[in-house]
Image (tube, rainbow, N blue to C red):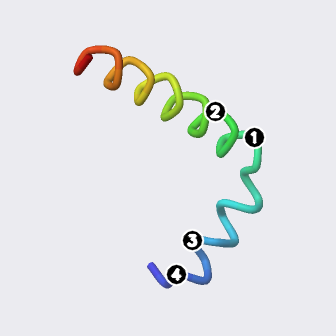
Amino acid sequence: MPIGSVIFEVIKNKKALGYLELFLKLYFENYASSIV
């Protein structure tokens, strides 16, 4: 899959990207707190 169409899909799916961003944020917060 060419990188251009990947970027296009990401732009097209801004809502999905928002959920992914939220998931990653929560994941990394949990990961960071488990290290400490």
Question: On the image, numbered disc 2 is attached to which residue?
Answer: 19
- Numbered disc 3: secondary structure: helix
**Amino acid of disc 3:** Val
User: Between disc 4 and disc 1, whose residue precedes?
Assistant: 4
Give the Cα separation between the discs numbered 3 and 2.
17 Å
Say which mark, if any, is on residue 15.
Answer: 1
User: Between disc 1 and disc 3, whose residue precedes?
Assistant: 3
Give the Cα separation between the discs numbered 2 and 4.
21 Å
Disc 2 + disc 4, Cβ < 8 Å: no
User: Residue 33's spot in the image, x, y percent?
Assistant: 34, 16
Question: On the image, numbered disc 4 is attached to which residue?
Answer: 3
Quarter in which the N terminus is drawn: bottom left
Q: Residue at x 66, y 60 (%)?
A: 10
Disc 3 + disc 2, Cβ < 8 Å: no
Give the Cα separation between the discs numbered 1 and 2.
7 Å
Q: Residues within 10 Å of mark 2 (few under 14, many from 20)?
A: few
- Numbered disc 2: secondary structure: helix
Say which mark, if any, is on residue 30.
Answer: none
- Quadrant of the rendered image containing residue 21: top right
**Amino acid of disc 1:** Lys
Q: Residue at x 57, y 71 (%)?
A: 6
- Horizontal side, residue 4 vs residue 13: left or right: left
Disc 4 + disc 3, Cβ < 8 Å: yes
User: Residue 18's spot in the image, x, y percent?
Assistant: 69, 38
Question: On the image, numbered disc 3 is attached to which residue?
Answer: 6
User: Between disc 2 and disc 4, whose residue precedes?
Assistant: 4
Disc 1 + disc 2, Cβ < 8 Å: yes
- From the viewer's perspective, is the residue at label 3 or at label 2 nearer? 2
User: Residue 31, relative to residue 12: is it above or below?
Assistant: above
